[in-house]
Image (cartoon, grey):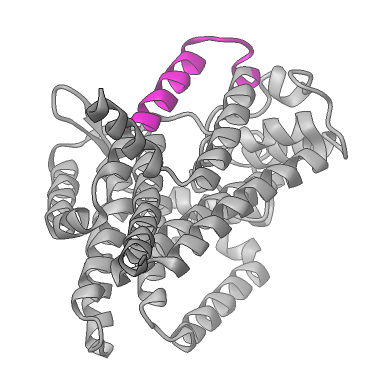
Amino acid sequence: MIRLFNAVMQVFRSIDWPVMLLLALLSVVGLLVMHSAVGGTDWRYADQSRYMVYALIVMWIVALIPSQFLARLAPLAYLITLALLVAVALFGESSKGAARWLDIGILRLQPSEIMKITLPMMLAWYFQRREGKVGWYDFMVAMVMTLIPFALIALQPDLGTALLVVASGFFVMYFAGLSFKLLIPLVLAATIGLSVIYINQDVLCEPETDWIVLHSYQKSRVCTLLDPTRDPLGRGFHTIQSTIAVGSGGLLGRGYMSGTQGQLSFIPERTTDFIFAVFAEEFGLFGALSLLFLYLLLIMRGLFIASRATTTYGRLLAGSISMTVFIYVFVNTGMVIGLLPVVGVPLPLFSYGGSALLSLAVAFGLLMGISAKRKQQQKAVKTAVRP
């Protein structure tokens, strides 16, 4: 009985309750919106509910594993995920023109989702090993470790996920001391490139114009962002319908399960990439801002955990996880309201999908484990100084 009590207490001590409360709120609202998006409780709602339960179990299991033990496993986890990405390139299952899945018999994996976790773990482990003697060449090594999975994922092709993987690695490097000034040339180049495309879009967006560095569908996404009416019934349909849904919500929204765009199935992919449009139509501007505020609190809590982490590994990994969640929310809501191209980035805890949800569960489990280690060390210090 005492052992059972101690085991239960260990589970509760591993939980960061502010993070858990925010995750619970977002998950409940996410399931409510999923219920509305599918118009009831069909197989997608049932699947998402089951995925939520699985995610909760996975998150607790990861949170219970000592972070220093997971840090030692980081290189192996990174190499295994790289091997899985190579296997996807050789034997991957194709869906909608892209080979992203790997069928290993008992389950189907999307290794690119796993890489969003194992890459920052690997880089955090590497910089902790180099603590106190980090030089420019260490950032070059980290860049190589980031660009290898980027190339493999981009070749699937899945440029959106590849950029998210790069972002997760970049945040580790930034928190490890990478100077922000080094990004100025990249920002200038991107600004100049986008300006050239905007000014010359009539020529560059012609079907016969080949952009060379991008696939035709990627070129279409950029051109559609500049002018959705260029193909209103094709690639522009997503952006046009989602912006109509967001705008029709007004300040207070049309009410739960009362949105016209969502309930009449005008919003494509309304259970996945564009579920935010369903939410904004039904709950309006105030509801959308409240949802973004919850995400902001979650990100801030993650950064707080990073700032109080007791190890370099914990600080870098917690910071990367928090900022990667920010990128998810920023990119998804940006593409829904027409400010960013459609790149297939899910809204955390809202969009339908098991792989993305389980990868988030692992990420938040790691975050809670880092928080729990700080609590353990604080308790040990108090015990040591107690007379």
Where the C terminus falls, by quadrant?
bottom left
Asked whether residue 187 is drawn in magenta, I would say no
Report whether residue 169 is seen. no
* Dominant secondary structure of the residues highlighted in magenta in the image: helix
In the image, 80 versus 340, the foreground residue is: 80
The residue furthest front is: 387
Location of residue 357 in the rendering, given as x and y in whole percent from the top left corner: 41, 36
Location of residue 271 in the rendering, given as x and y in whole percent from the top left corner: 55, 27
Location of residue 10 in the rendering, given as x and y in whole percent from the top left corner: 32, 39
Residue 53 falls left or right of residue 70? right
Residue 140 falls left or right of residue 280? left
Q: Residue at x 68, y 42 (%)?
A: 291
Location of residue 178 in the rendering, given as x and y in whole percent from the top left corner: 39, 82
Q: Residue at x 69, y 50 (%)?
A: 293
| The magenta segment | 36-57
Residue 76 falls left or right of residue 41? left
Residue 63: image quadrant is top left
Residue 259 lies, with reference to residue 364, above or below; the image says above
Residue 316: image quadrant is bottom left
